[in-house]
Every structure is written in structure tokens, then in C-alpha cells.
Amino acid sequence: MMMRIFYIHVVLRLCRNAAARRQNMADLRPRSHNNKRECVKPVKIEKKQGSLAKIQIEDDGSYVQVNQDGGKQKLEKAKISLNDCLACSGCITSAESVLIQQQSHEELLKVLLNNKANADEHKVVVVSVSPQSRASLAARYDLSSSEAGRRLTSFFKGLGVHHVFETTYSRTFSLLESQREFVERFKRKEQDSKRLPMMTSACPGWICYAEKTHGEFILPYISTTRSPQAMMGSLVKGYFADQQGLTPKQIYHVAVMPCFDKKLEASRSEFYLDEAETREVDCVITSGEVQRMLEEKNVSLNEVEPVPPDIMFSSVSGGEFLSHAGSGSGGYLHHVFTYAAKQLFGEEVKQLTYRTLRNKDFQEVTLERDGVVLLCFASTYGFRNIQNLVQKLKKGKSPYDFVEVMACPSGCLNGGGQVKPLPGQTPKELLAKVEALYKAERPLSPEDDIRVSELYRSWLHSVGEERARAFLHTGYHTVEKMTNGLAMKW
């Protein structure tokens, strides 16, 4: 009898991290999340033509086909490509056309292996490590975040990586540009009602959701300032390439990040250099993938000889790992608030007082004078809080001037790509440890970072205002949902 294969799409609640689903689409796991958007889990079924069968979920989470005669057949998980996922009306957009295997630690290892085998195709490999990833790996190996950073530098160079940078100074660019953008918006708010609240744009999960779910309504509120990862892409494929006498295409740039959604960000068309035919960030690997690399190489970070990170700027000495005050998601609220208070109202804010609203992931900060609220900022983490915020905004009831928005509950330190808890360790315990390690590093005010001040003078001023803006800012666009069989609900 003829056999045919078709897919049963079982509707699941949205996972906390959209790209984590894409990373292992053949083995999705539902996670508790208060988001109304849905995703699908494909199951491959062989069925005789004309027969009747039903699908049921076993206690262990597996799917079985129950035939008319009562017989059961365990169903094989169907492997689907990223292009299949793009056809869905869920989280992934049609702009993200890079295959997922190009965003993995295996791809980095292939490039390093190719460097050894083919001198003609040699790439200068640059790895940029985020402070959140350093803190996550430090927690796993009981190291300080700075010590973990030095040992990671040594580990990557031992694999054949040429340069290892830390991304604190690229985040300094993001903070400085966010400060200036907010003050400009605030001064012109009377001319355009959609200038405030300004919402941060460093979280690609939030950006993907905004573009696809709320489109033209929400996009004018979103900051145009690039994220630290995107800023680093500009620095590596722009400034650093120039300094080294290289073309952007001769550099293979890898970012180590706490979040799978950063792979989405790297694949955006806005961060592709058309003339050079290369992406600003060629590959993103998560903290967990770095942990997997260590295990595959049978290496413990504790046993690696530490070396200082590389310095991108020849006139700046030292290799100290620094941090920024405020949240573990970059401290955007903290730095924009203190800067705006001084620039707009002449107020020196030494310490911010946060007020928790609905839950610990929704907090508010205000600046008051004589009982009048001058500034009202908020941090909003997790999609439940984001949806509540957007609904208030649509109803004209949002009191905020600025909102630090992150898709993950507890922010970037709790990103879906971070190292997982050890046996016997709860996620809450691990997160507390990561937060403590992250905050233990010496904070540096963005205005006091001489590395960035030097680049503003020597590089950005020399390239012209229009090009400088392209290096530091970006844009967003509405993404239309597609309707087809892959999006069907059962």
C-alpha cells in the first residue's frame, strides 16, 4: 500500500529564547512563558493511506501514533531546516536567511582548521567576549570574571584565534550614543509624540518581537543606537581592519554572547557590508557553546594559563576587564538616567532608587523636584511585562520617558545561552552567583573611558558624520506575518 509522510504540528507555548528553538529545532522543549505567541513542533508520521489514527503525548513527553487496532507507534522527530521555520508566522522572520550551522562553534573550528590547511584562504580570526559570558563561565569554574576572561583569551589563542577582545568598550559606545539620543528626543518631544518613551534596542529577541508583532506602531519608540555586539562589528570590520591593513572580508569575527538571539542579530541585513560582501559579525557562539568547546577539547578553564586580552588601540595600555554600573543587561537605564538628569535639569544623581512594580522584572526610577516628576524611567524584562508595557502605550497610559527592555526574565545574565546549573544547583542559585561575579569588576563611567574618547577623535570624526552614524546606529522595519499550512493550529 502507498505510504505518505506528513507533519503534525503540535502547538507549544513560546520558549523563553526564540533562537534556542532554532538552534535545536528537532528537539524542542516547552518552557513556561506567559507569551501568547506560539511555535510548532514537527513530528514525522508514516501512515497508511485511508487508515485512521490519533496522536497522543506520553508521560515522558514523547509522541505516539495510536492506530485503530490499539497498536502504538513511537513517532520520530522530523528534522526541519531554518527555511521551514521561516515559513511559520511565529518568531522567526524572513530576513534571517543564514543557515543555523553557520552560527555555531563547529563553524569556528572549521575556519581555524582551514587556516592551518590552506594558506591562500587564511582568515584573521577575532573573538569578542561579552562580560555576561565571562561571568557565566567564571561561575562554572569558580573564578573571578576577569580571571575567566584571561583564561578564555589563552584558550582561544591556543586554538589558533589571532585576537581576543572584550566588549566593554563597544558597550561604552552604545551607552554614550543612547545618552545623546535620549536627550535629543526629550528636547524635541513636543514636536513628535512618538519620540518618548525611548526603548532600548540591545535585545534582538525584543526587536524581533516588536518588528513582527507591533510594527509601525512601536518602531518609532525604539532607539536607533546599535547594540554592543553590533558596535563591535563596526569596530572590528571597520577601525581594526583599517589599522591592520586588512579588508573586512579577510577577518572572521566571532562574538561570544549570553543569548541565542544574538545569532539572529548577526544575520540581519543591516549588519551586512555589501561592498565587502561580508557580515560584521560572522558567527555568534553562546557561553554554553564555549563550555561545550572546552569539554570537547577535554580542557578545564582552571588549568589554562591566563593571558591578558588584546588591546584594539595602540595608544592605550593595560588589559584590565572593566564593567558598567547598573543592571547586568548593560546598565542602560542607569547611565541614561544620570546623564539626562545632569544635562536636562542640572541634577547630579549619585545613587538610583528603584521601585518594584508588578514584579522584580518591572522596576521604576523617577527624578522629582518640588513634588514634580521630571523624569520617569523603567526596566522591563520578560515578555509578560513587555506586553503589559506595550498595551499601556497603545492606550496612552504609559508614564515613561525611557524603558530598558530585555526579553529574558532577569535580563542578559539569565540569557538562554548561558551555562546551565550543575547537578544540585538551582537556576536561582546560579544566577545569584553570576550576578555577584559580574558586579565585582571595577565599574567605569562611559564618559571616562579614554579608549572610546580616542576613537571618537581619531576615527569617527575623520570618516564624516554620515558614515559615523552608520557605524553607531541602525534601523528597524515592519515584518509581515505569513500565513500557510505550517502555521496551522490544531
Image: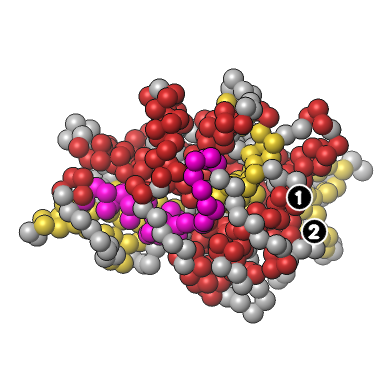
Q: Can residue 274 be seen in this view?
A: yes
Residue 6: x and y in percent read: 76, 44
Numbered tag placed on residue 297 in the rendering? 2
Q: Is mark 2 on a helix, strand or loop?
A: loop
Q: Is residue 171 above or below residue 145?
A: above
Which quadrant of the structure image shows residue 87?
top right
Residue located 60% across and 38% down the image: 281
CB within 8 Å, label 1 to label 2: yes
Q: What element carries label 1?
A: helix
User: Which residue is disc 1 drawn over?
Assistant: 159
Of residue 320 and residue 402, the one placed in the foreground of this image is 320
Which quadrant of the structure image shows residue 68?
bottom right
Residue 330: x and y in percent read: 43, 53
Q: In this view, does 339 lie to the left or right of 416?
A: left
Residue 336 within the magenta-colored segment of the rendering: yes
Extreme-right residue of the structure: 1
Q: Is residue 395 above or below residue 114?
A: below
Residue 257: x and y in percent read: 58, 51
